[in-house]
Image (cartoon, grey):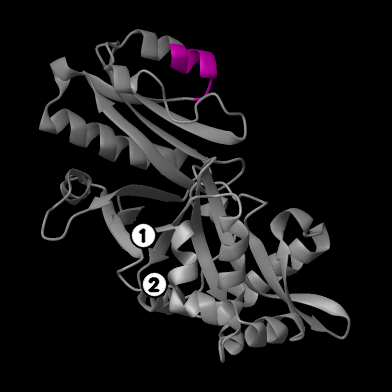
């Protein structure tokens, strides 16, 4: 008999894994040892023997789970077993924990049905509620001086305008708690269809805001800094940074201010890092326009990521 079981204790999970014959790439679960994440682990057993698992991670206290691993041992890897594990695990997680949203990501190739998509399509309880497509690009920072829109932004005229506009870019590391609280409060009121949250770790705990390359744009109003936009970055390594979010509030998008903000952030990043990567959410016209303005000569498309938001059929849940 095949059944699934939700394991909470770290030692119990390690004991379960010791009963599996894992491939080398499966020997370590992503971020398993880091205490800053909650881990959800569902084991698959046949007559009491370990044959597979589903593993997911989320920020502490978060209600959204990022599905990180699905594994069935080679000797039991049938289509029926894989579908049973996935479907039963998702239903068990949503029924038995605080989690009410599960995301699963893959590298998207046009006109090709990904295996993860196929699995969800063929489960009994699960379905794809929505998909977010993210185009990925890479820029060498030593080419910035050759880019027309960058040179325009760095000109004396526009830098004078930037410094005397009443706007300023505040490094995330320097943002005070009450200022971040204002960003959180504003987020709850924002109803724009293209809104992108600066709190990237809420959506995917494998991302982490780098406080020294991420910036909040503020506008001084009656002597108080009010947040009106942001560039949020994730540090890849000592030479690479990824811009995960670029967003300006809709009423502040007129003119050249958004471009000035982003270009000044790029200038700061280029002092230390050789490569900047961009995650451009499909439909984010601000970032799509920025990529178009740079041009294919200097920026390279490196692929597309699809993030599935998975739901459970209500009358089955």
Q: Earlier in the sequence, mark 2 or mark 1?
A: 1
- Residue 137: x and y in percent read 36, 59
Q: Which residues are magenta?
A: 8-14
Question: Spatial distance from mark 2 to mark 1, Cα to Cα?
Answer: 8 Å
Q: Secondary structure at mark 1?
A: strand
Q: Nearer the viewer, residue 115 or 214?
A: 214
- Residue 72: x and y in percent read 23, 24
Q: Quadrant of residue 189?
A: bottom right
Q: Quadrant of residue 37?
A: top right
Q: Residue furthest right?
A: 223
Callout 1 crowding tier (Cα within 10 Å): few <14, some 14–19, many ≥20: some
Q: Is residue 69 magenta?
A: no
Query: In the rendered image, which residue does mark 1 sit on?
Result: 137
Q: Is residue 13 magenta?
A: yes
- Residue 126: x and y in percent read 27, 49
Residue at screen point 54% across, 72% down:
247
Residue at screen point 13% across, 32% down:
80
Q: Quadrant of residue 315?
A: bottom left
Examine the residues drawn in magenta and state their main secondary structure.
helix
Q: Secondary structure at mark 2?
A: helix
Residues at marks 2 and 1 touching, judged by CB atoms closer than 8 Å: yes
Query: In the rendered image, which residue does mark 2 sit on?
Result: 291
Kindly tell me whether residue 134 is visible in this rendering: no
* Image: 126 above or below 38: below
Q: Nearer the viewer, residue 139 or 121?
A: 139
Residue at screen point 11% across, 27% down:
78
* Image: 250 above or below 10: below
Kindly tell me whether residue 302 is visible in this rendering: yes
Mark identifier at residue 199: none
Callout 2 crowding tier (Cα within 10 Å): few <14, some 14–19, many ≥20: some
Q: Nearer the viewer, residue 131 or 90?
A: 131
- Residue 267: x and y in percent read 59, 64
């Amino acid at each position: 008999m095949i059944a699934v079981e939700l394991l909470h204790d770290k030692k119990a999970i390690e004991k379960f894994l010791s009963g599996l014959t894992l491939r080398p790439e499966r020997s370590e679960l992503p971020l398993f040892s880091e205490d800053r994440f909650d881990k959800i682990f569902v084991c698959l057993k046949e007559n009491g023997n370990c044959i597979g698992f589903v593993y997911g991670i989320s920020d502490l206290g978060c209600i959204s789970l990022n599905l990180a691993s699905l594994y069935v041992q080679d000797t039991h890897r049938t289509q029926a077993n894989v579908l049973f594990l996935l479907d039963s695990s998702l239903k068990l997680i949503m029924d038995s924990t605080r989690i009410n949203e599960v995301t699963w990501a893959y590298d998207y190739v046009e006109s090709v049905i990904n295996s993860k998509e196929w699995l969800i399509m063929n489960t009994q309880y699960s379905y794809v509620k929505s998909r977010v497509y993210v185009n990925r690009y890479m820029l060498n920072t030593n080419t910035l001086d050759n880019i027309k829109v960058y040179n325009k932004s760095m000109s004396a005229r526009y830098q004078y305008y930037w410094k005397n506009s009443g706007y300023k870019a505040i490094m995330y590391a320097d943002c005070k708690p009450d200022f971040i609280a204002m960003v959180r409060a504003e987020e709850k009121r924002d109803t724009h269809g293209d809104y992108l949250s600066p709190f990237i770790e809420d959506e995917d705990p494998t991302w982490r805001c780098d406080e020294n390359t991420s910036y909040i744009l503020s506008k001084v109003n009656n002597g108080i800094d009010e947040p009106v936009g942001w560039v949020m970055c994730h540090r890849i390594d000592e030479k690479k940074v990824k811009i995960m979010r670029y967003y300006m509030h809709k009423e502040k998008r007129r003119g050249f201010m958004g471009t000035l903000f982003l270009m000044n952030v790029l200038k700061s990043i280029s002092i230390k890092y050789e490569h900047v990567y961009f995650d451009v959410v499909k439909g984010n016209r601000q970032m799509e326009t920025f990529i178009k303005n740079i041009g294919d000569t200097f920026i390279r498309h490196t692929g597309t990521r699809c993030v599935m938001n998975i739901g459970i059929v209500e009358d089955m849940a």
